[in-house]
Amino acid sequence: MDTLAAAHELLVTRLSAERSGPREDPADPSTVQAMQLVINLPKQDPPTRSAVLGDAAVGVVTLCLDPRAGEEGFWRDALERWYSHRIRKVARRGRNKAWADVQSLPGVTVGSVRAFVPSAVGEVPKELRKLQVKGTELEPSGPLRVSAALPTLYMNADLHMSAGKAAAQAGHASMLMAAALPLERVRDWQGSGYGVNVVEAPAAELERRSEQAGAVVVRDAGFTEVAPGSVTAVAVPGASAEPRGAAAPRG
């Protein structure tokens, strides 16, 4: 069974479809689906902001295209429910024992970030619920350069997003890029470990990059930190990629 093809097809078809899941009621957490992200932020030698954004981007797309997403079962079912709702992510801070405790929960760890299989907000495991959403501030750092052949995520520096908010948006950009790329290009990207370049740039630069072939624009729904409709990120395919076209923006 080609599990990557099956996981990619699920991502493409569900993100391009009209939302068909149950109506969401913010007052009822059982109706709202979200992917939790935990950032490991030790007091001594914390990761750089660019590293966190890159790890979040890689972690999210790796989880979405995990072999278990291509097979019947819990992992795929959870993603399908999430894809059918607003694509929400919640970034939390962890360190020391709290970071170690969440490693046993279903998800993917990449560097300083662990992405978890989505669930209803009202069903988030207690190990995650107790972690703070605030406190993810990190000073801007230099661009994370991997390879010109890999996708580049341009993050809107003018919005002054916290590292947690920006990490969620980087993850959103990477999964939308995966949905926009043909399967064979995704296979090539998988071979690199889904590596990305991350560049925080002014909004004017994002506007310019959005005009490149295959660019994917991420517009935020405005639940936290930024105004609804704000362009938080633009993902541009690598030099060797041949995207099918930009995926519909989600936020």
Image: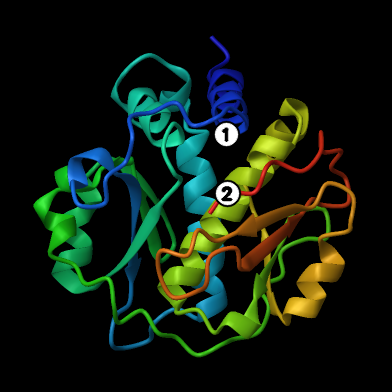
Q: Which residue is mark 2?
A: 250
Q: Which mark is residue 154?
A: none
What is the crowding at mark 1: few (fewer than 14 residues within 10 Å), some, or many (at least 20)?
many
What is the crowding at mark 2: few (fewer than 14 residues within 10 Å), some, or many (at least 20)?
some
Q: Which residue is mark 1?
A: 15
Amino acid type, mark 1: Leu
- C-alpha span from label 1 to label 2: 9 Å
Is residue 217 placed above or below 245 in the rendered structure?
below
Q: Are marks 1 and 2 in contact (CB under 8 Å)?
A: yes
Q: Residue at x 40, y 69 (%)?
A: 224
Q: Residue at x 35, y 67 (%)?
A: 39
Percent across and percent down for residue 67 are 47, 26
Is residue 138 placed above or below 100 in the rendered structure?
below
Answer left or right for 142 relative to 50.
Answer: right
Is residue 146 placed above or below 248 in the rendered structure?
below
Percent across and percent down for residue 149 are 82, 53
Q: Secondary structure at mark 2?
A: loop
Q: Secondary structure at mark 1?
A: helix
